[in-house]
Each structure stands twice: as structure tokens, then as C-alpha cells.
Amino acid sequence: MTAAALAGKRVAIYARFSSANQRDASIEDQVRRCRAEIERLGGAFDPSLVFEDRAVSGASLARGGLDALLQGALTQPRRIDVIVTEDVGRLSRDLADATALLKRLSYSEVPVLGVADGINTAGPGAKVAYTFRALVGDLYLDDLRFKTLRGLEGQALKGRSTGGLPFGYRSRPILDARRQVEGHEIIIDDTQADIVRRIFRECRAGHSQATIARGLNADGVDVPRAKTRHRKVGWIASTVREMLHNEAYVGRWSFKRKQWRKDPETGRRRYRKRDASEVLRHERPHLRIIDAELWDAVQARLAAVRAKYKGSNGSTNAPGRRTAYPFSGLLRCGACGAPMVIAGGSPTRYYRCSDAQKRGTCANRLAVREDIVTRRMLEALRDRVGGPWALAFIRKRVAELLGEGSRTLNAELKARRDRLARSEASIRELISMMIEGDRSPRVRQMRDDLEAHADAEKRAIEGLVASAQEPIRLPSPAEVEARLVDLERLVTASPTEAREALRQLFSDGAIRLDPQADATYIARTEILPLVLLGPGSAKPRSGIQAGPPYTSLGCAGRI
């Protein structure tokens, strides 16, 4: 172009850098270089026509600075006649997006000048040069994605952070001998970990996810990412639900579960779940926040809720609202199967069939006082669980389950030791290859990956051995009695939590009330007595779960 090519034209500058690790000075350097080129070509620098995007990828057009630039160049009245950028790859590194941009700008007769690559889209042959540069940029992004994923896989195999840690964890830099950062170690954030434990305990106690979220907001607890640019305002049920399903809290970490892709129609990034064979899974017992018993209890409750309360749209609503009646939600009409609901005024409240009361579709009109149901059901529990014959059954079943757990644990130990032995043999072979002269990056990477797998197996074996060495102790009569007393106290102190404890005690979380000819009900259910022991009484070994489905005792009584 001639020295006066830009004289009298309104010239805009566009600058961008993509990584948060790059210096902000990169923008100033690009603007300085573009300004010098504008002045060389006889144009005038206008600070109000400088558009920039900091730490934003060129793979997407969803950029504030680019949007403002295009607004000035493509809409009337037009404020921009020419766009100058360090190189055309700053506008877009996606081939399709770059081609679409060129068409729009060419139609509006707004040329783009690339300082470093010498491209002028108004000149002859510019379309070929521009398209070639866009193709190079697109291929660069593909190569960058591959190398980034490869690097992250290496960090994951070494047990290091790959970014986006769950609430309850933070990272700290790992320095090499030259004090350079070579990765980030994952550690537990003690303050956030206490919040995670609170969420799991409240879920196990019977509170719904929405109730838990409201309690956290009432106590002013910071939400995940509270101090980042992605911060959210207040806890919500979906955040709690995501945490309750996150296996990282029991030391089971995974990488590459999701694959992010840009939607060609909308330009938005969306993820797809990868095939299970592609997912990297690792046991990291040192990063456990939730113990196995609490995790299993919560997962059992979530599974029961999904099975029983799944809506037509696939959503689930947990029965966790506050209540003054511990058996609400547990009682079913024996005539039609509908829930028995509270009716009547103060001070006496009654359970009635909901279909009979609201719809008139059930012939069962019999009501039963709430206080009688609560008293008689607790008496039946004490009689059928606290008696000598029931205690003998419980101790026998616990001993059987502990034996089954030991066999499962031994099988898992053998499998992990076999895998460790194979990994260590492969590591020795690779070291021999390196000693003999093969020091290629591929061999070093294979060795690093195998060493990371071997370390993970060693940690898992240490955890299993520690579990095997824990003393076996069967529940005593005093412990069973204490649990019954605790349950009876909970009925008065916190009916909501008592309802959840009772729900787990009964098969399918339900009690059927069969109406009788003499205007009474017979309650029918199956009791799961081992659930009453709860965490810590007779601690299961790895491979068995505390709670359903254990052999049950029948329970039927007149109320």
C-alpha cells in the first residue's frame, strides 16, 4: 500500500490475546505496532477506535471487543472504514468463522490489514492468502487441543490438578529444582470440607436439597467459585445435588468424562460424555472428605428417592420438607396404595387416605389419630428389634456380612497387587530400554504414566490393608437399646430427621395401613434391623454396604 493509503479514513485497531497466562502488555504491544503501521500509511490514530479482548480464545466469535468492532464496521451509520490488526488470526482462528467474517466485511467494503502477515483483504489474491492463514490458525487450534489434552492427562495420571476442582479442594504449586512451577498438587480445603460434610449429613438426616441450600444461604456460606469471575449468587438445589453425586469426595477421581465441542450453529461450547473406556479413573484415598458409610447412606437415599419420586420429565423431588409428623410420607392406604395424609384441626390430627379425601376414588374413609400411629409404631419397633431373639438375628447377620466383606476385600487386594506387579515389570523394561539408549519422549511418557498408575495402586492397597486390620466388633444389646432410645428422642426433637431415619428402617420406605371391619388398622411392613445400627456400630469391610438390602423381619400390628 502507498504511504497515503489510509489518509482521511476512520481506522480501527483490534488486539487480542488468548491465555490468562500471557501478559496484559501483549495488548499494548499489538496496539503500538498497529498504530505505527497506520501512521506509516498516512492514517490518524484514534484511541476511541481501539477494540481489545483479553484472555479470550480466538476459537469463538463470542467476544465483547470483537462484537463492538463489528457493530462499528457493519451497521449504519458506519464508524469504521478500515480494520488493522497484528495478524488476521487475531480476528478468528476458526476456519468457518474467519470465512464468514471476511464475507461480511467484504460486503460492507471494510478491508482488514494484517501488519505481521502482510494481508490486505482489499487487494488482489487476498482471499486465497486470508483463507490460507485461517486454515493454518484452525489447524493450530486442533494441534493445541491435542497437546493440551495430552499434558492434562499426564498431570491427571500423576494425581495433580487439571483445573476446575470440586468445592472442598484447592491446589498449590509444585516447584522443581529451579523453583519453576511444574504442576499443582490437589489438597483438601478444611473450611470448605466442613461444608461438604454438613451437606452430606443433612441429606442423610432427611433434608431435601432445596432445604439444605436455603440453610447454607441463611448461614451466609460462600457458594462454589465465590471469588472467581464465574461466581454464583447463593446456593441452589442443583448445586447441592451435583455435590452429593460427586465421587471425588470419597477419593474416586476421574478425568476426560466430558468432551467439549463448539456448536457450529450457535458458536456455544457444549459437552458430550465420553465413552467409559476413555475415562481415566484413579483412587486417591488421601483426598477423601466423606467416609464410606456416610457416602453409601446418602447414595442409598438418593437412589430410593429417584425410584419412588421420579417425575414424568425425569426429574426427582426428594421428600425433605419440614414436618411435625415423623410418619408423614411413609404411610400408604392398604385399600388403594395412595399416601395417607394429615387432616383435622388442632389439637387432634388424623391420617386419612389422600385419594378418598381429595378425589373420592377410594372407599376407605377410616381415619386414625396421628399420635396413636406414632406411639404404636415405636412400640412395635422396640418389640421386634429390641427383643432377645431379634438381637440374636442381628448379631448373626452382621457376622455373616463381615465374613462376606472379608472375602470381597481379599479378592480386590489380589487383583490390585497383580496389576501393581504388571505395572512394575513394565516400568523395569522401559528403564532397561532407556539405559540401552532409547530416551525418546514416547518412552519417557510411558514410564511416567506407568509410575503414576503404580502409585495409585499402592495407595489403594494401603487403604484396603488398613480396612482389613480394623477390629471386628458385633453390636451389643446396650448399643441396640441406645439406638432405639435415640430414635424415640429424635421423633420429638426433629420429626423431619426422624422421618428419614424411619424411612430407611422399612422396606421400600413404606408402611401399609390395612383398614379392618372393626374400624381399626393393621400396619404391615418389613423392618430392616441392621439399618438401625447406622454408621460405626459394626463397621462393614470394603465391599459391603451398611443399609438395604439386608434380610428383614416382618412387622404387623393393630393400631
Image (cartoon, rainbow, N blue to C red):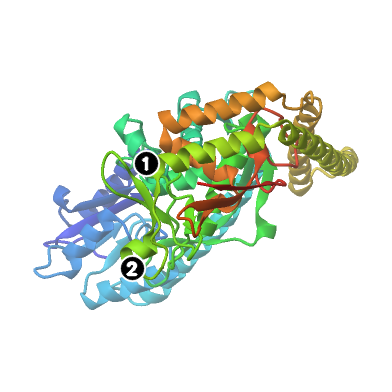
Q: Is residue 239 above or below residue 353?
A: above
| Crowding near the residue tagged with mark 2, few <14, some 14–19, many ≥20 C-alpha atoms within 10 Å | few
Tally the marks.
2
Q: Residue at x 59, y 56 (%)?
A: 146
How many angstroms separate mark 1 from mark 2 (CA)? 24 Å
In the image, 448: left or right of 10?
Answer: right
Task: Residue at 33% x, 68% y: name it.
Answer: 359
Q: Horizontal and vertical percent for residue 205?
A: 49, 36
**Left-right relation of 100 to 511:** left
In x, y percent, where is residue 114? 34, 60
- Residue holding disc 1: 323
Of all residues, the one furthest to the front in this rendering is 518
Q: Secondary structure at mark 2?
A: helix
Residue type, label 1: Thr
Whether residue 498 is visible? yes
> Residue 262 location in percent, x, y?
45, 64
Given residues 326 and 45, the one toward you in this image is 326
Seen in the image, is 39 located left or right of residue 160?
A: left
Tag 1 secondary structure: loop
Tell me the mark number nearer the camera, choosing from 1 and 2.
Answer: 2
Q: Which residue is mark 2?
A: 359
Q: Earlier in the sequence, mark 1 or mark 2?
A: 1
- Residue placed most toward the observer, 341 or 36: 341
- When asked about the image quadrant of residue 482, the answer is top right
